[in-house]
Amino acid sequence: MQNTNWNRETGKTVACILEKREEILSFPKFQVWQKRNVELRN
């Protein structure tokens, strides 16, 4: 019972992190920075 509850909480936390990550990645400034970073590497 405890383990299932722990997994549910972890799942919520992971979902929240992924959601935030999506927000950050879709942020235009970040995309511009990422593009610049890729150009520097090539």
Image: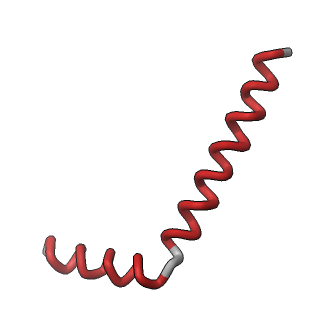
Q: Position of residue 7 (x, y in %)?
A: 73, 28
| Residue at the spot 81% in from the left edge and 25% down from the top edge | 5
| Residue at the spot 57% in from the left edge and 66% down from the top edge | 22
Q: Is residue 19 left or right of residue 28?
A: right
Q: Is residue 5 left or right of residue 27?
A: right
Image quarter in which the C terminus is found: bottom left
Q: Position of residue 1 (x, y in %)?
A: 86, 15
Q: Position of residue 41 (x, y in %)?
A: 15, 71
Looking at the image, which is closer to me, 42 or 33? 33
| Residue at the spot 76% in from the left edge and 17% down from the top edge | 3
When the figure is inspected, residue 15 is found, relative to residue 29, above or below; the finding is above
Q: Is residue 39 left or right of residue 23?
A: left
When the figure is inspected, residue 7 is found, relative to residue 25, above or below; the finding is above
When the figure is inspected, residue 22 is found, relative to residue 16, above or below; the finding is below
* Location of residue 33 by image quarter: bottom left
Q: Position of residue 27 (x, y in %)?
A: 50, 78
Rendering colour mode: secondary structure
| Residue at the spot 80% in from the left edge and 23% down from the top edge | 4
Q: Is residue 24 left or right of residue 20?
A: left
* Location of residue 21 by image quarter: bottom right
How many numbered markers are drawn? 0
